[in-house]
Amino acid sequence: MSALSPDKEAETSGEPLRSDEAANADAPALGGEVEPAVIPASAEVALHELGESLAATVASVQGEMARYNTALGTYVLDEIDISIPVMLRVTKLGQVMARVTDSQTPDSAVGQIRLRLKPSTGAAPVPTPNGAAQPLHTIDLITREALARLAEERVFSVGDLLRVASTPAGRDALAREVFGYDLRGVLERAALVSLPLPAGVSTLLLKLGVTSPEQFVKSDPAQLSDAMRGYADLPVHASDISQWQEAAAAYMDALPLYR
Amino acid sequence: MLKQLVGTYGLSPLSGARAATEADGESFGSLEGLFAAGARGMVEAQQALDEHGRARLLIWETDGLPPTVWTCSNCRLRFPAAFRVEPKADASGATRLHVAPQSGARGGVSLSFRYVPTPQEEL
C-alpha cells in the first residue's frame, strides 16, 4: 500500500467504471505491440471492497471445512495471505481506490496490498447491523443525480455513505462534490437506517416521520408502538421499542455524527 | 486435493510466457471458488485417508501388519498469481476477486489449514 497517486494524475485511466464497462476494462492489451509498463487490467474499486471479497472467501472456506467434523478432530483455517499489486489513488471524497494490475515491471505507481488473515482465539464476534447494507435510495432525500454521482464514486449503500462522511473533510467533500447543500438531514437518515433494528423497522420509522437516531431514542415507546401497529399492523409493543432504543443508543456512540 | 485443483483451475506448471497468456485468457477463477476447492479437496483427501485407515484396521488380524492411520496435519497451498476484480454494481452486489496462477507474477496467494485433534485424542 505504498503508492498513492493524487486524483488528478490518475484521471485519464482512473475514471470510475460503470458496470457495463467492466468487461472492456478487463480486456488484455493485445496486438503484439510493446506492452506498457503498467497495464490497468482490472476495474477500479474502493479499497474496502477487496477486504469484503476476502471475508466472503473465508466464509466459503470455513463452510467447506465444516464438512469434516469427526469425533477425532477437525480442520481449522490457519492463515490466508494474499498479495495484490495495485495502483492506488485517493478520490475527491477521500476514498482510497484500488486498481489491480498485472504489471511485472517495477513501477513507482504500482504498490502492493497484502491481506493476511489469521484466526484469533477467544475473540467474541461482533454482530454487524445489516441496515448499513441498505441501498442509498432507502433514505429518500437523495436525488437521482446525486445517487448516480455517488455510484460513480462507488458509494452504493448507507454504510458506504457513512464511511465517507465519518470525517469532517469527507462531509465537506460530499456537500461540495455531490449534494451542493448541507447534508445533515441525509446523514441523520442514513444513521437511522444503519441502526441495529429488526429488518424493515428503520424504513417504517422514516415513514412515520422519525428521521434521526436521536429522535428515535427520545420518542415515547408507547406512542411509537401504537403508531407502528396502526401503520403497518405489526405486533410491536412498547417494551420492544424500549429494547430497540437501548440498542440504538449504545450503537450511536459508534456513529460519526454523534461522536 | 491436487487433482481437484488441477481439474478446476488448471494448476499445471506453466512457462512464464505461457502462464502470462493463460492469465490473460480463460484461466481466471474466483478466489472464493479456488480456496473453497482447496478446502474441499483437503477434506476429501482426509476422508480417503480415514477410509484407508479403517480398511487397515479390518485386515490387521489377517495380515498381522500393525495398522497405520494418516492425518494431514498441516496443508499449505501457495502460488504466484495474477488478479482481476469484478466490481459490484449496486448495494446488493458483491465485489469479487478473481485469480489465476501465473509464473513470475508480483502477486500471490497462500492458504493453510491445520488439523486440530479433539482433547481426548490428544491424550
Image (spheres, coloured by chain):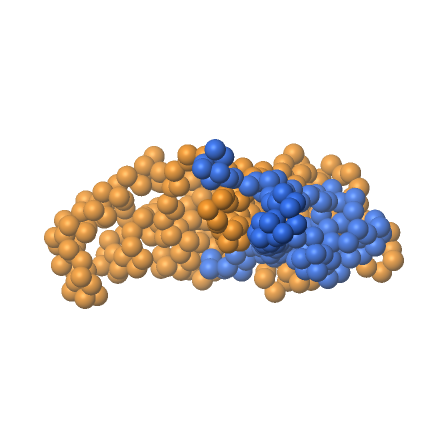
Q: Residue at x 41, y 34 (%)?
A: A122
Indicate the colour of chain B.
blue
Quadrant in which the C terminus of chain A appears: top left
Indicate the colour of chain A.
orange
Q: Residue at x 47, y 57 (%)?
A: B91
Q: Position of residue B100 (x, y in %)?
A: 71, 53
Depth check, front residue: A38 or B102: B102
Depth check, front residue: A176 or A84: A84
Compared across the picture, whether B110 is left or right of A202 comes to: right
- The answer to whether residue A183 of the structure is visible from this angle is no
Q: Position of residue A182 (x, y in %)?
A: 38, 47
Depth check, front residue: A70 or A252: A70
Q: Position of residue B44 (x, y in %)?
A: 59, 54
| Above-or-below relation of A98 to B24 | above
Compared across the picture, whether A38 is left or right of A172 comes to: right
Compared across the picture, whether A205 is left or right of B80 comes to: left
- The answer to whether residue A124 of the structure is visible from this angle is yes
| Above-or-below relation of A203 to A49 | below
| Above-or-below relation of A254 to B86 | above
Q: Residue at x 42, y 53 (%)?
A: A133
Number of numbered tags placed on the structure image:
0
Compared across the picture, whether A39 is left or right of B73 comes to: right
Quadrant in which the N terminus of chain A appears: top right
Q: Residue at x 28, y 48 (%)?
A: A212
Depth check, front residue: A180 or A55: A55
